[in-house]
Amino acid sequence: DGVAVLPAPQNLSVQSTNMKHLLMWSPVIVPGEIIYYFVEYQGEYESLYMSHIWIPSSWCSPTECPECDITDDITATVPYKLRVRATLGSQTSAWSTLPHPFNRNSTTLTPPVMEVTKDGFHLVIKLEDLGPQFEFLVAYWRREPGAKEHVQVVRSRGIPVHLETMEPGAAYCVKVRTFVKVIGRHSPSSQAECVKVQGETLPL
Amino acid sequence: GQEFQFGPCRVEGVALQELWEAFRAMKDIVQAKDNITSVRLLRKEVLQNVSDTESCYLLRALLKFYLNTVFKNYLDKAADSRIRKSFSTLANNFFVIASKLQPSQEKEMFSISESARRRFLLFQRAFKQLDIQAAQTKAFGEVDILLTWMERFYQ
Protein backbone atom coordinates (compact mmCIF):
# COMPACT_ATOMS: atom_id res chain seq x y z
CA ASP A 1 0.00 0.00 0.00
CA GLY A 2 1.02 3.60 -0.76
CA VAL A 3 1.75 5.79 2.19
CA ALA A 4 -1.45 7.28 3.63
CA VAL A 5 -0.81 10.97 2.82
CA LEU A 6 -4.12 12.11 1.43
CA PRO A 7 -6.89 13.00 3.89
CA ALA A 8 -9.51 10.29 4.12
CA PRO A 9 -13.00 11.04 2.73
CA GLN A 10 -15.36 12.33 5.40
CA ASN A 11 -19.09 12.44 6.12
CA LEU A 12 -20.03 9.10 4.60
CA SER A 13 -23.74 8.49 4.38
CA VAL A 14 -26.21 6.41 2.39
CA GLN A 15 -29.30 7.80 0.73
CA SER A 16 -31.70 4.99 -0.18
CA THR A 17 -35.01 5.46 -1.95
CA ASN A 18 -37.12 2.70 -3.53
CA MET A 19 -34.30 0.18 -3.22
CA LYS A 20 -31.78 2.42 -5.01
CA HIS A 21 -28.87 2.97 -2.67
CA LEU A 22 -26.40 5.85 -3.05
CA LEU A 23 -23.28 6.10 -0.89
CA MET A 24 -22.07 9.70 -0.60
CA TRP A 25 -19.13 11.49 1.05
CA SER A 26 -17.41 14.85 1.16
CA PRO A 27 -14.87 15.22 -1.66
CA VAL A 28 -11.15 15.33 -0.96
CA ILE A 29 -9.82 18.51 -2.57
CA VAL A 30 -6.27 18.89 -3.94
CA PRO A 31 -6.21 21.97 -6.21
CA GLY A 32 -5.48 21.12 -9.81
CA GLU A 33 -5.56 17.38 -9.21
CA ILE A 34 -8.06 14.61 -9.95
CA ILE A 35 -8.80 12.44 -6.96
CA TYR A 36 -9.99 8.86 -7.49
CA TYR A 37 -12.02 7.00 -4.89
CA PHE A 38 -12.25 3.27 -4.20
CA VAL A 39 -15.35 1.85 -2.55
CA GLU A 40 -15.53 -1.57 -0.89
CA TYR A 41 -18.24 -3.43 1.00
CA GLN A 42 -18.68 -6.30 3.41
CA GLY A 43 -21.92 -8.15 4.12
CA GLU A 44 -22.80 -9.55 7.51
CA TYR A 45 -21.36 -12.92 6.55
CA GLU A 46 -17.98 -11.49 5.66
CA SER A 47 -17.80 -9.33 8.75
CA LEU A 48 -18.65 -12.28 11.00
CA TYR A 49 -16.74 -15.11 9.30
CA MET A 50 -13.93 -13.44 7.34
CA SER A 51 -13.54 -9.85 8.47
CA HIS A 52 -10.32 -9.36 6.53
CA ILE A 53 -12.24 -9.75 3.26
CA TRP A 54 -13.65 -6.63 1.58
CA ILE A 55 -15.24 -6.69 -1.86
CA PRO A 56 -14.68 -3.92 -4.43
CA SER A 57 -17.89 -2.13 -5.39
CA SER A 58 -19.23 -3.01 -8.81
CA TRP A 59 -19.16 0.53 -10.18
CA CYS A 60 -16.83 2.61 -8.03
CA SER A 61 -13.43 1.02 -7.85
CA PRO A 62 -12.36 3.56 -8.94
CA THR A 63 -14.61 6.60 -9.42
CA GLU A 64 -13.99 10.34 -9.64
CA CYS A 65 -17.30 11.41 -8.11
CA PRO A 66 -17.81 11.66 -4.36
CA GLU A 67 -20.72 9.25 -4.56
CA CYS A 68 -21.35 5.64 -5.53
CA ASP A 69 -24.43 3.69 -6.62
CA ILE A 70 -24.13 0.58 -4.47
CA THR A 71 -27.49 -0.89 -5.44
CA ASP A 72 -25.96 -3.84 -7.31
CA ASP A 73 -23.67 -4.60 -4.38
CA ILE A 74 -26.40 -4.82 -1.73
CA THR A 75 -27.92 -8.18 -2.61
CA ALA A 76 -29.13 -9.49 0.74
CA THR A 77 -31.25 -8.10 3.54
CA VAL A 78 -28.39 -7.95 6.05
CA PRO A 79 -26.27 -5.08 7.42
CA TYR A 80 -23.45 -4.05 5.06
CA LYS A 81 -20.26 -2.26 6.08
CA LEU A 82 -19.00 0.21 3.49
CA ARG A 83 -15.67 2.03 3.21
CA VAL A 84 -14.05 4.55 0.88
CA ARG A 85 -10.52 5.79 0.35
CA ALA A 86 -9.00 8.44 -1.91
CA THR A 87 -6.00 8.09 -4.19
CA LEU A 88 -3.84 10.53 -6.12
CA GLY A 89 -1.18 8.78 -8.13
CA SER A 90 0.69 6.64 -5.61
CA GLN A 91 -0.69 8.56 -2.69
CA THR A 92 -3.46 6.77 -0.85
CA SER A 93 -5.64 7.94 2.03
CA ALA A 94 -6.73 5.83 4.96
CA TRP A 95 -10.07 4.07 4.67
CA SER A 96 -13.16 5.84 5.94
CA THR A 97 -15.93 3.49 7.04
CA LEU A 98 -19.66 4.26 7.13
CA PRO A 99 -20.46 4.92 10.79
CA HIS A 100 -23.42 2.50 10.87
CA PRO A 101 -23.80 -0.56 8.63
CA PHE A 102 -26.47 -0.12 5.98
CA ASN A 103 -29.40 -2.54 5.59
CA ARG A 104 -31.66 -2.29 2.57
CA ASN A 105 -34.71 -2.78 4.75
CA SER A 106 -34.28 0.87 5.78
CA THR A 107 -34.87 2.17 2.28
CA THR A 108 -37.45 4.96 1.90
CA LEU A 109 -40.45 3.78 -0.09
CA THR A 110 -42.39 6.51 -1.90
CA PRO A 111 -45.89 6.34 -3.34
CA PRO A 112 -45.53 5.13 -6.94
CA VAL A 113 -46.15 7.33 -9.94
CA MET A 114 -49.16 6.16 -11.91
CA GLU A 115 -51.10 7.18 -15.00
CA VAL A 116 -54.82 6.42 -14.97
CA THR A 117 -56.52 6.55 -18.37
CA LYS A 118 -59.63 5.36 -20.19
CA ASP A 119 -59.55 3.26 -23.29
CA GLY A 120 -63.17 3.43 -24.39
CA PHE A 121 -65.01 1.91 -21.40
CA HIS A 122 -61.83 0.35 -20.04
CA LEU A 123 -60.14 1.69 -16.93
CA VAL A 124 -56.41 1.41 -17.57
CA ILE A 125 -53.40 2.10 -15.37
CA LYS A 126 -49.75 2.48 -16.22
CA LEU A 127 -47.14 2.22 -13.43
CA GLU A 128 -43.52 3.32 -13.33
CA ASP A 129 -40.87 0.63 -13.61
CA LEU A 130 -39.18 0.36 -10.20
CA GLY A 131 -37.44 -2.93 -10.85
CA PRO A 132 -38.11 -6.64 -10.27
CA GLN A 133 -38.28 -6.39 -6.48
CA PHE A 134 -41.50 -4.34 -6.59
CA GLU A 135 -45.13 -5.40 -6.70
CA PHE A 136 -47.96 -2.87 -6.97
CA LEU A 137 -51.15 -3.12 -4.94
CA VAL A 138 -53.73 -1.31 -7.03
CA ALA A 139 -57.00 -0.35 -5.30
CA TYR A 140 -59.89 0.90 -7.42
CA TRP A 141 -63.54 1.62 -6.82
CA ARG A 142 -66.57 3.15 -8.37
CA ARG A 143 -67.10 6.60 -6.89
CA GLU A 144 -70.48 6.24 -5.27
CA PRO A 145 -71.66 5.75 -1.71
CA GLY A 146 -70.98 2.26 -0.36
CA ALA A 147 -68.92 1.25 -3.35
CA LYS A 148 -66.69 -1.82 -2.85
CA GLU A 149 -62.94 -1.37 -3.16
CA HIS A 150 -61.19 -3.89 -5.41
CA VAL A 151 -57.51 -4.68 -5.03
CA GLN A 152 -55.32 -6.12 -7.76
CA VAL A 153 -51.63 -7.11 -7.46
CA VAL A 154 -49.72 -5.92 -10.51
CA ARG A 155 -46.23 -7.21 -11.23
CA SER A 156 -45.85 -6.07 -14.81
CA ARG A 157 -43.89 -2.84 -15.03
CA GLY A 158 -44.13 0.12 -17.35
CA ILE A 159 -46.95 -1.33 -19.47
CA PRO A 160 -50.67 -0.48 -19.38
CA VAL A 161 -52.83 -2.80 -17.27
CA HIS A 162 -56.59 -3.14 -17.67
CA LEU A 163 -58.40 -2.86 -14.37
CA GLU A 164 -62.13 -2.67 -15.03
CA THR A 165 -64.78 -2.21 -17.67
CA MET A 166 -66.61 0.95 -16.60
CA GLU A 167 -70.30 1.74 -16.62
CA PRO A 168 -71.23 4.72 -18.84
CA GLY A 169 -71.47 7.96 -16.82
CA ALA A 170 -69.86 6.46 -13.70
CA ALA A 171 -66.66 7.79 -12.14
CA TYR A 172 -63.92 5.46 -11.00
CA CYS A 173 -60.99 6.14 -8.68
CA VAL A 174 -57.64 4.44 -8.32
CA LYS A 175 -54.80 4.54 -5.80
CA VAL A 176 -51.65 2.44 -5.60
CA ARG A 177 -48.92 1.47 -3.21
CA THR A 178 -45.85 -0.69 -3.69
CA PHE A 179 -44.76 -3.84 -1.88
CA VAL A 180 -41.11 -4.91 -1.78
CA LYS A 181 -40.83 -8.65 -1.25
CA VAL A 182 -37.26 -8.90 -0.05
CA ILE A 183 -37.80 -6.46 2.79
CA GLY A 184 -41.48 -7.17 3.38
CA ARG A 185 -42.54 -3.51 3.43
CA HIS A 186 -45.17 -1.35 1.71
CA SER A 187 -44.94 2.23 0.51
CA PRO A 188 -47.55 4.83 1.47
CA SER A 189 -50.49 4.97 -0.90
CA SER A 190 -50.53 7.40 -3.78
CA GLN A 191 -53.17 10.09 -4.03
CA ALA A 192 -56.38 8.75 -5.57
CA GLU A 193 -56.96 9.62 -9.22
CA CYS A 194 -60.44 9.50 -10.69
CA VAL A 195 -61.76 9.30 -14.25
CA LYS A 196 -65.23 9.42 -15.65
CA VAL A 197 -66.33 7.77 -18.79
CA GLN A 198 -66.60 10.45 -21.47
CA GLY A 199 -65.14 12.88 -18.95
CA GLU A 200 -61.73 14.28 -17.90
CA THR A 201 -59.55 13.09 -15.05
CA LEU A 202 -61.13 14.67 -12.04
CA PRO A 203 -59.02 16.02 -9.21
CA LEU A 204 -60.23 14.73 -5.84
CA GLY B 1 -44.55 -11.93 -2.15
CA GLN B 2 -42.49 -15.01 -2.81
CA GLU B 3 -41.23 -16.95 0.19
CA PHE B 4 -39.83 -20.31 1.23
CA GLN B 5 -41.98 -22.69 3.23
CA PHE B 6 -39.91 -25.56 4.63
CA GLY B 7 -42.68 -27.34 6.47
CA PRO B 8 -43.42 -25.19 9.50
CA CYS B 9 -40.43 -22.95 8.77
CA ARG B 10 -41.28 -19.89 6.73
CA VAL B 11 -38.54 -17.70 5.23
CA GLU B 12 -39.23 -14.33 3.67
CA GLY B 13 -36.87 -11.66 2.37
CA VAL B 14 -34.82 -13.79 0.03
CA ALA B 15 -35.27 -13.67 -3.73
CA LEU B 16 -34.39 -17.12 -5.11
CA GLN B 17 -33.78 -15.52 -8.49
CA GLU B 18 -30.93 -13.46 -6.99
CA LEU B 19 -29.29 -16.64 -5.67
CA TRP B 20 -29.49 -18.35 -9.04
CA GLU B 21 -28.05 -15.30 -10.78
CA ALA B 22 -25.18 -15.17 -8.29
CA PHE B 23 -24.36 -18.87 -8.69
CA ARG B 24 -24.64 -18.84 -12.47
CA ALA B 25 -22.18 -15.94 -12.60
CA MET B 26 -19.47 -18.16 -11.10
CA LYS B 27 -20.69 -21.68 -11.89
CA ASP B 28 -18.26 -22.36 -14.75
CA ILE B 29 -15.25 -21.06 -12.84
CA VAL B 30 -16.14 -22.97 -9.67
CA GLN B 31 -17.12 -26.25 -11.29
CA ALA B 32 -14.07 -26.21 -13.58
CA LYS B 33 -11.88 -26.52 -10.46
CA ASP B 34 -13.63 -29.71 -9.34
CA ASN B 35 -11.49 -32.55 -10.67
CA ILE B 36 -13.20 -35.38 -8.80
CA THR B 37 -16.12 -36.07 -11.10
CA SER B 38 -16.84 -39.52 -9.70
CA VAL B 39 -18.05 -38.24 -6.36
CA ARG B 40 -21.23 -36.34 -5.53
CA LEU B 41 -21.73 -34.98 -2.01
CA LEU B 42 -25.40 -34.00 -2.28
CA ARG B 43 -26.41 -37.34 -3.68
CA LYS B 44 -29.92 -38.80 -3.94
CA GLU B 45 -29.93 -40.36 -0.49
CA VAL B 46 -29.38 -36.92 1.04
CA LEU B 47 -32.08 -34.92 -0.73
CA GLN B 48 -34.62 -37.31 -2.21
CA ASN B 49 -38.03 -37.94 -0.59
CA VAL B 50 -37.49 -35.37 2.15
CA SER B 51 -40.80 -34.53 3.82
CA ASP B 52 -41.75 -30.90 4.28
CA THR B 53 -41.32 -31.13 8.03
CA GLU B 54 -37.94 -32.79 7.71
CA SER B 55 -36.75 -30.19 5.18
CA CYS B 56 -36.40 -27.46 7.82
CA TYR B 57 -34.06 -29.59 9.95
CA LEU B 58 -32.04 -30.79 6.98
CA LEU B 59 -31.62 -27.42 5.31
CA ARG B 60 -30.58 -25.77 8.54
CA ALA B 61 -27.83 -28.36 9.04
CA LEU B 62 -26.67 -28.06 5.42
CA LEU B 63 -26.65 -24.25 5.39
CA LYS B 64 -24.77 -24.04 8.68
CA PHE B 65 -22.19 -26.44 7.26
CA TYR B 66 -21.87 -24.38 4.10
CA LEU B 67 -21.51 -21.17 6.10
CA ASN B 68 -19.03 -22.56 8.64
CA THR B 69 -16.99 -24.95 6.53
CA VAL B 70 -17.50 -24.64 2.79
CA PHE B 71 -17.68 -20.88 2.35
CA LYS B 72 -15.45 -19.89 5.21
CA ASN B 73 -12.04 -20.11 3.60
CA TYR B 74 -13.22 -19.99 0.05
CA LEU B 75 -12.83 -16.26 -0.48
CA ASP B 76 -9.16 -16.30 0.43
CA LYS B 77 -8.54 -18.32 -2.69
CA ALA B 78 -11.00 -16.45 -4.88
CA ALA B 79 -9.06 -13.40 -6.05
CA ASP B 80 -11.45 -12.82 -8.96
CA SER B 81 -13.77 -9.95 -7.89
CA ARG B 82 -16.65 -11.35 -9.94
CA ILE B 83 -16.49 -14.48 -7.81
CA ARG B 84 -16.24 -12.44 -4.63
CA LYS B 85 -19.37 -10.46 -5.47
CA SER B 86 -21.42 -13.55 -6.34
CA PHE B 87 -20.02 -15.38 -3.35
CA SER B 88 -21.07 -12.53 -1.09
CA THR B 89 -24.62 -12.63 -2.43
CA LEU B 90 -24.90 -16.37 -1.84
CA ALA B 91 -23.23 -16.37 1.57
CA ASN B 92 -25.25 -13.47 2.95
CA ASN B 93 -28.56 -14.85 1.69
CA PHE B 94 -27.73 -18.33 3.03
CA PHE B 95 -26.95 -16.56 6.29
CA VAL B 96 -30.42 -14.91 6.25
CA ILE B 97 -32.17 -18.21 5.49
CA ALA B 98 -30.25 -20.16 8.13
CA SER B 99 -31.02 -17.55 10.76
CA LYS B 100 -34.73 -17.82 10.03
CA LEU B 101 -34.93 -21.62 10.13
CA GLN B 102 -36.06 -22.44 13.65
CA PRO B 103 -37.35 -26.03 13.61
CA SER B 104 -39.25 -27.36 16.58
CA GLN B 105 -37.15 -29.08 19.26
CA GLU B 106 -40.08 -30.92 20.80
CA LYS B 107 -39.78 -34.60 21.63
CA GLU B 108 -42.37 -35.81 19.17
CA MET B 109 -40.29 -34.38 16.37
CA PHE B 110 -37.28 -36.50 17.36
CA SER B 111 -37.73 -39.17 14.69
CA ILE B 112 -38.01 -36.54 11.96
CA SER B 113 -35.04 -34.52 13.15
CA GLU B 114 -33.09 -37.76 13.51
CA SER B 115 -33.89 -38.70 9.92
CA ALA B 116 -32.66 -35.28 8.80
CA ARG B 117 -29.51 -35.73 10.86
CA ARG B 118 -28.76 -39.09 9.22
CA ARG B 119 -29.14 -37.52 5.76
CA PHE B 120 -26.83 -34.68 6.75
CA LEU B 121 -24.25 -37.13 8.10
CA LEU B 122 -24.22 -38.92 4.72
CA PHE B 123 -23.26 -35.59 3.14
CA GLN B 124 -20.74 -34.69 5.83
CA ARG B 125 -19.01 -38.11 5.72
CA ALA B 126 -18.64 -37.86 1.96
CA PHE B 127 -17.19 -34.37 2.42
CA LYS B 128 -14.67 -35.57 5.01
CA GLN B 129 -13.45 -38.37 2.80
CA LEU B 130 -11.97 -35.80 0.44
CA ASP B 131 -9.05 -33.43 0.86
CA ILE B 132 -10.49 -30.29 2.49
CA GLN B 133 -9.84 -27.99 -0.46
CA ALA B 134 -11.16 -30.49 -2.99
CA ALA B 135 -14.20 -31.02 -0.76
CA GLN B 136 -14.86 -27.27 -0.44
CA THR B 137 -14.58 -26.83 -4.20
CA LYS B 138 -16.91 -29.74 -4.87
CA ALA B 139 -19.47 -28.63 -2.28
CA PHE B 140 -19.37 -25.11 -3.66
CA GLY B 141 -19.92 -26.47 -7.16
CA GLU B 142 -22.95 -28.39 -5.93
CA VAL B 143 -24.81 -25.25 -4.78
CA ASP B 144 -26.98 -25.60 -7.89
CA ILE B 145 -28.13 -29.01 -6.64
CA LEU B 146 -29.02 -27.39 -3.32
CA LEU B 147 -30.82 -24.44 -4.97
CA THR B 148 -32.77 -26.82 -7.21
CA TRP B 149 -33.91 -28.75 -4.16
CA MET B 150 -34.76 -25.52 -2.27
CA GLU B 151 -36.80 -24.33 -5.23
CA ARG B 152 -39.34 -27.02 -4.46
CA PHE B 153 -40.22 -25.15 -1.28
CA TYR B 154 -40.42 -21.67 -2.90
CA GLN B 155 -43.93 -20.34 -3.31
Image (cartoon, rainbow, N blue to C red):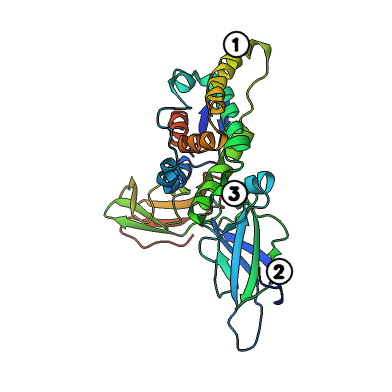
Viewer-side residue, B104 vs B41: B41
Chain letter behind tag 2: A
Residue B42, can we see it? Answer: yes
Q: Earlier in the sequence, mark 3 or mark 1?
A: 3
Q: Amino acid at mark 2?
A: Ala
Secondary structure, mark 3, is: helix
Viewer-side residue, A88 vs A181: A88
Give the Cα distance between marks 3 and 1: 39 Å
Badge 3 and badge 1 both on one subunit: yes
Q: What residue is shown at x 34% (from left), y 50% (from top)?
A: A161
Give the Cα distance between marks 2 and 3: 23 Å
Residue at the spot of label 2 = A94
Residue A137, can we see it? Answer: no
Residue at the spot of label 1 = B111
Secondary structure, mark 1, is: helix
Q: Quadrant of residue A88?
A: bottom right
Give the Cα distance between marks 1 and 2: 56 Å
Q: Are marks 1 and 2 in contact (CB under 8 Å)?
A: no
Q: Are marks 3 and 1 in contact (CB under 8 Å)?
A: no
Q: Position of residue A142 (x, y in %)?
A: 41, 47
Q: Position of residue B139 (x, y in %)?
A: 50, 34
Q: Residues within 10 Å of mark 2 (few under 14, many from 20)?
A: some
Q: Residues within 10 Å of mark 3 (few under 14, many from 20)?
A: few
Residue at the spot of label 3 = B76
Chain letter behind tag 1: B
Q: Position of residue B116 (x, y in %)?
A: 56, 18
Q: Quadrant of the C terminus of chain B?
A: top left
Q: Amino acid at mark 1?
A: Ser
